[in-house]
Amino acid sequence: MDLQHAQKTVDNWIKAHGVRYFNELTNMAQLTEEVGEVARIISRRYGEQSEKESDKNKDLGEELADVLFVVLCLANQTGVNLQDAFDKKLEIKTKRDHNRHHSNEKLK
């Protein structure tokens, strides 16, 4: 599924199952909360913190999907075409970073 289709799918879901989009500030708070849940899993599972028993069954993929869902909501309600924005960003990063990363001694 491309990003345009994902945005449309989320919009259809909101129309069918939600009353409306939460406002932008609420969704920004939701996004922060979801990113925090991803950070908790990463820091405990892959970082130096020990993983609590209650966290061992948390699904990283599910939490990343929560982040993506809220990002898609924010894009929809602010009129951002994420496919266009992503394509432009990838082009910028490709031009800017190709040689930079290949010459980075830290990455070898």
Image (cartoon, grey):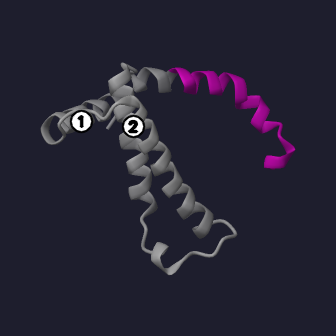
> Residue under circle 2?
27
What secondary structure is the magenta-colored segment mainly? helix
Q: Is residue 103 magenta?
A: yes
Give the magenta part as a residue range: 88-108
Note whether 58 is above or below 36 in the view shown: below
Comes first in the chain, label 2 or label 1: 1
Name which residue type carries label 2.
Asn
Is the residue 70 above or below the residue 49 in the image?
A: above
The residue carrying pointer 1 sits among few (fewer than 14), some (14 to 19) or many (20 or more) residues within 10 Å by Cα, namely some
Closer to us: mark 2 or mark 1? Answer: 2
Return the residue nearer the eye: 87 or 102. Answer: 87
* Label 2 close to label 1 by CB (< 8 Å): no
Q: Is residue 45 above or below residue 38?
A: below
Hey, what amino acid is under mark 1? Thr
Label 2 secondary element: helix
Percent x, y of residue 26: 39, 37
**Which disc, if any, is residue 9?**
1
* Image location of residue 77, percent across then percent down: 33, 25
Could you tell me how far apart the alpha carbons at marks 2 and 1 are, in whole angstroms? Answer: 17 Å
Q: Residue at x 77, y 37 (%)?
A: 102
Residue positioned 63% across, 76% down in the render: 50
Q: Vertical placement of 62 versus 74: above or below?
A: below
As drawn, which residue projects farthest toward the left? 16
Between 61 and 33, the residue placed more toward the observer is: 33
In which quarter of the view is residue 48 placed? Answer: bottom right
Residue 93 screen position, x and y as percent: 64, 27
Q: Position of residue 96 (x, y in %)?
A: 71, 24
